[in-house]
Image (tube, rainbow, N blue to C red):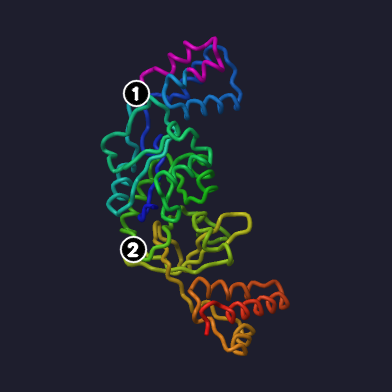
Amino acid sequence: MKHQGPTLIADIGNTLISRSRPGTRSRVISALTEHGIVLEDDHERTIGKVIFTAPDLDACERSLAGIYPELRKVISDALHEPAGSATILPGAREVVSSATAAGWRVIAATNAAAGTPSLPSELDGVSGIAWSAEYGVAKDDPRFWRMLLEREQVSPQLALVVGDSPRTDREVPRAVGLQTLLVQPDGCTLTTLAADLATAGPMPPGTAAVIVNDGEQWAGRPIVTAPHLESLVVRVTRSRHRLVTGDGRACWGQVVRRKSLPPAVISEADHLPGVSWLLNQRERSRFVAPASLRAALAAAGISLDDLSAEEHRHAISMVREARDTGTAAERISDLVRFLRDRPGRP
């Protein structure tokens, strides 16, 4: 059963903490380079994959020694160097505290290899850690994120991925339908997010998704890229919803389908809140049946009143979005036949 509340998925290194010594991958690559090994990009990726997914340092050493057998001791020494200590980055403590206070579950996601420093005790609001070493795949692999969703029973519509890497913490999670927020090095992103989480407050009843504004613009308007809302616009070009925050602010926003990009949320107000809750509530009156559809329904003695809000919206959008009058007429005919033959209709 999926977790019913919101989930914050936070990267560890360079997001929540910094380390006093280079990570395992950096130490191994540096050691190999110092001993005359010329590493191309694909070689470094291979080394990183081995280190990020090895269950322990001994297994990591065996795998790397299979690639560079003459440098096994060099590799072993680099792997077993002291890991150093961890320092909490600006904004990290605040964002974890604000999230947990507002009812969010906080999960850390990391490529950190075996032997790296553990999270400081001050970040005890982190309830679990998703390790690439445990999953057997690194964070730049979509399978990592799918496994995280499955193992932690995360609802994608109520999740936010926060991290510093444009690829592993933004591009790849977005590709599997997760909302993301890219963290800047100065800590301002986390501090702002902490304040926005506090303002948004606990998730209200009837929430369909969480919306986090990262300041993006599209066609001259502020938007939120929302890959987690793909299901709302599978059959229509836009879906209008109420957006609310804990301080009483509310507005209407539209989830719009985009041809080659993920869906986006566009607010009908001047700006989007930092964090808001998208409700299941829709303004049904916005979906008025075209005159041609109303006439066909009246002639058949049937109506759309018995349809659910989702079916009502889809029926009207299907006719409105027809490419020409002939297609619209065919869709109206199909809809009338469907409603007339609907099971349970007298």
C-alpha gap between disc 1 and disc 2: 43 Å
Magenta stretch: give its range: 62-83
Total marks shown come to: 2
Numbered disc 1: secondary structure: loop
Chief secondary structure of the magenta span? helix
- Identify whether 11 is placed above or below 342: above
Left or right for 205, reference 149: left
Q: Residue at x 37, y 26 (%)?
A: 116
Q: Nearer the viewer, residue 301 or 218?
A: 301
Which dot, 1 or 2, sits closer to the camera? 2
Q: Residue at x 56, y 61 (%)?
A: 220
Mark 2 crowdedness (10 Å alpha carbons): few <14, some 14-19, many ≥20: some
Q: Residue at x 44, y 31 (%)?
A: 133
Q: Give the residue type at disc 1.
A: Gly
Numbered disc 2: secondary structure: loop
Query: Where residue 92 sits: x, y (%)?
Result: 34, 42
Q: Does residue 75 show up magenta in the picture?
A: yes
Q: Residue at x 50, y 45 (%)?
A: 173
- Identify whether 8 is placed above or below 83: below
Query: Where residue 63 sits: x, y (%)?
Result: 51, 20
Query: Where residue 27 sits: x, y (%)?
Result: 46, 21
- Identify whether 299 is placed above or below 108: below
Q: Which mark is residue 209?
A: none
- Report the residue marked by disc 1: 84
Query: Where residue 163 sits: x, y (%)?
Result: 44, 42
- Report the residue marked by disc 2: 204
